[in-house]
C-alpha cells in the first residue's frame, strides 16, 4: 500500500505597505498612520494576523479598517475588527487580489525626541505559505521637532510699569523744553 502524496502547498503572497501623514511633528503633536494590506495570491487567505505596536514615544488612539479592494475568490475580504483603540492586533481575510486599509490616529509624547519608527507586519495563518516574506512588513518614520521653551513668566503679569507724579511732571517739562527749542529754530528773524 502506498502512502497518499502530500497535498500541494497553499501559497499566498501577503503584502503590507505603511505611510504616515507627516515626516516631522512637534512634541505633543498628532500623526496618522495608514496601513495597506493586500493578497497577491494565488490562494485566498482567512485569518492572517496583522500586528502594529506603537513605538516608544507614540500612543495609538482609535483605528479603523475598511475594505478597499474585494478581490475575487472563495472568501469574503474583510477586516477582523472594523475599529479599535491602541495597538493593532487583529486578523484579516483576503481574497486573492483583495486589500484592506487601516487608519491609525496617533499622538507623540511631549518628551519624545529624535526619529520614531513604527513597524507593522502581516503573517499568513497556519496551513498557508507566504513565498515572498520580504513584503510582509512596513515601516514609517517621524522626526520629532522639539518645541522651543515658553518665555519666562513676568513676576506680576497684571502690573503695568508706571511713573510717579514727580517723574511725570519732569517728563512733561523736558518735552516742553525740547518743543520750545525746536520752535525757536523755526521762527523767521526780521
Image (spheres, rainbow, N blue to C red):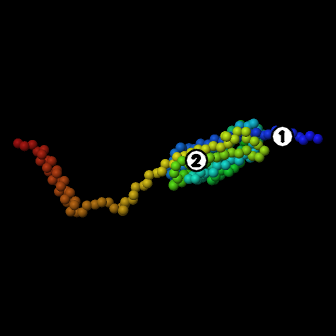
In the image, what residue occupies the spot 85% across and 41% down? 6
Taking the spot 90% from the left edge, 41% from the top edge, the residue there is 3
In the rendering, which numbered label is found on residue 7? 1
Where the C terminus falls, by quadrant?
Answer: top left
Quarter where residue 38 is shown: top right
Q: Is residue 38 above or below residue 105?
A: above
Q: Determine whether, in the image, residue 71 is placed left or right of residue 164.
A: right
Q: How many labels does the image show?
A: 2
Give the image location of residue 181, x and y in percent: 14, 49
Front-most of residues 169 and 128: 128
Name of the residue lying farthest toward the front: 2
Residue 174 % position (x, y): 18, 55
Q: What element carries label 1?
A: loop
Single out the residue that lies furthest toward the right: 1
Q: Residue at x 22, y 61 (%)?
A: 167
Q: How far apart are marks 1 and 2 (CA)?
A: 41 Å
Left or right relative to 107: residue 9: right
Q: Judging from the image, what secondary structure is the residue with disc 2 in?
A: strand
Q: Tell me the residue that label 2 is attached to.
A: 117
Taking the image as drawn, is residue 111 in sight? yes
Amino acid at each position: 500500500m502506498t502512502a497518499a502524496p502530500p497535498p500541494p502547498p497553499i501559497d499566498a503572497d501577503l503584502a503590507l505597505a505603511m505611510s504616515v501623514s507627516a515626516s516631522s511633528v512637534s512634541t505633543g503633536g498628532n500623526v496618522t498612520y495608514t496601513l495597506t494590506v493586500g493578497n497577491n495570491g494565488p490562494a485566498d487567505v482567512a485569518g492572517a494576523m496583522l500586528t502594529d505596536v506603537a513605538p516608544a514615544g507614540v500612543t495609538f488612539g482609535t483605528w479603523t479598517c475598511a475594505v478597499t479592494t474585494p478581490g475575487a475568490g472563495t472568501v469574503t475580504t474583510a477586516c477582523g475588527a472594523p475599529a479599535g483603540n491602541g495597538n493593532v492586533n487583529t486578523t484579516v481575510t483576503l481574497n486573492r487580489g483583495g486589500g484592506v486599509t487601516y487608519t491609525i490616529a496617533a499622538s507623540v509624547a511631549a518628551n519624545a525626541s529624535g526619529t520614531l519608527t513604527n513597524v507593522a507586519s502581516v503573517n499568513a495563518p497556519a496551513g498557508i505559505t507566504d513565498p515572498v516574506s520580504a513584503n510582509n512588513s512596513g515601516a514609517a518614520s517621524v522626526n520629532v521637532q522639539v518645541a522651543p521653551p515658553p518665555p519666562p513668566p513676568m513676576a506680576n503679569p497684571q502690573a503695568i510699569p508706571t511713573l510717579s507724579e514727580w517723574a511725570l511732571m519732569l517728563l512733561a517739562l523736558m518735552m516742553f523744553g525740547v518743543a520750545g527749542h525746536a520752535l525757536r529754530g523755526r521762527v523767521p528773524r526780521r
